[in-house]
Image (cartoon, grey):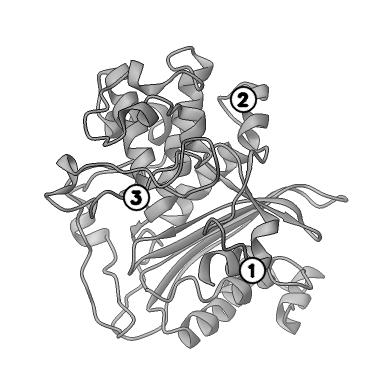
Amino acid sequence: MVSLLISALIIGSFGPGDETAVYKEKCRDIAASAKIPLIQLEYKSGKKTISFESAQFEYAKESPDCNTVFQAASLSKPVFAYIVLKMADRGEIDLDKPLFSYTDIDRFVNKEWAKLLTARIILSHKSGLQDWAAAPSSDAWPSSKIEFMFRPDSCFGYSGEAYAFLQRAVEKIRGKSLEEIAVEEVFVPFKMTNTSYIWKSSYDTQAAPGYNNKGENRGQGRHPRANSAYTLRTTAADYSKFLTVLAKGTGLKSKTHKEQLTPSVNAVYNFGKERPCDKYIFWGLGVGIEKNPELGDIIFHWGDNGNFKALFIIVPAQKGRPASHLVYFTNSSFGHDIINQLVPLFYNIKEPLQISSWIND
């Protein structure tokens, strides 16, 4: 589904500035209908870039330079996964070596199963761990006991707790904090100046507040500690730079990059309760993969911190069409309701993405 205005753009009836304005207006209509106060988006295809921030209501303000910072939620994970893979290429960490050889397993109830956990198992979400042992921003979380739901490496099971465990191993290996490592490996090299796993003083005025399903402003939501699974804050323009790196495998060995984007497990979200959409969704090393009959193997990740929702997709080059990516951030609990309205603005597809059903149903 592509509007007449967008169709006109495709055949070159408008200039670049008009093009962005048309996409922004269409996006504003979609976001407003979903009661989303603020959305920020960037789309890149070849030399084309569409980037904007759109406020739908008077109480939500657009920044003049499109640099409002959003909670990226689980879009934190692919950035950390990339760091781990870079370390593996340098021999700093072995993806298949049990992590207890790098850090302690004191919080685990089942120590024998904990000794089976490796970086590869965690990055592909086959750890068998619960998502969180306790609310990760709570005072109780650092000392909470970690339980397994399944034996490690037996099936897909999405887990932030597993990423936090891998983070502890990485920090022990490097002798530095997550933020220090990320600055060295990603933020500075790729000029992601508005991105951080921790609160920066500039965020006092730059960070968007989140809105719940009642339309209530629940604040910016500061996290007490850096966590590789959910505390990243960023902008669409910054994260788009990382997606270019992710798509090309910049800084990784070609073999490692291929492994990262190769399905290693069918991502049945609720084990034993397979849905029709699940058969299209797989997981590589730190990223999801939708096997889409129209667009090919779409690389994706979604983010959900309650009142902040985000998504990216990377679409491979195909039949003369250049590789492209789309990323958006919202400050609303309704941020995932618009996936199958937003994506067709940029991709000429006949069927909805399975990603939407996988996340929402």
Give the Cα distance between marks 2 and 3: 24 Å
Which element carries disc 2, helix, strand or loop?
helix
Q: Position of residue 337 (x, y in %)?
A: 51, 76
**Front-most of 38 and 154?**
154
Q: Callout 3, which amino acid?
A: Tyr
**Front-most of 246 and 288?**
288
Which mark identifies residue 230?
Answer: 3
Q: In the rendered view, would you say 250 is above or below 226?
A: above
The crowding category of the residue bearing disc 1, from other C-alpha atoms within 10 Å (few below 14, some 14 to 19, many at least 20), is some
Q: Which image quarter is the C terminus in?
A: bottom right
- Point out the tag, 1 or 3, that comes first from the N-terminus: 3
Give the Cα distance between marks 1 and 3: 24 Å
Q: Residue furthest left?
A: 139
Q: Callout 1, which amino acid?
A: Val
Which element carries disc 1, helix, strand or loop?
helix
The crowding category of the residue bearing disc 3, from other C-alpha atoms within 10 Å (few below 14, some 14 to 19, many at least 20), is many
**In this rendering, the label closer to the viewer, 1 or 2:** 2
Residue of label 1: 343
Q: Position of residue 327 (x, y in %)?
A: 53, 58
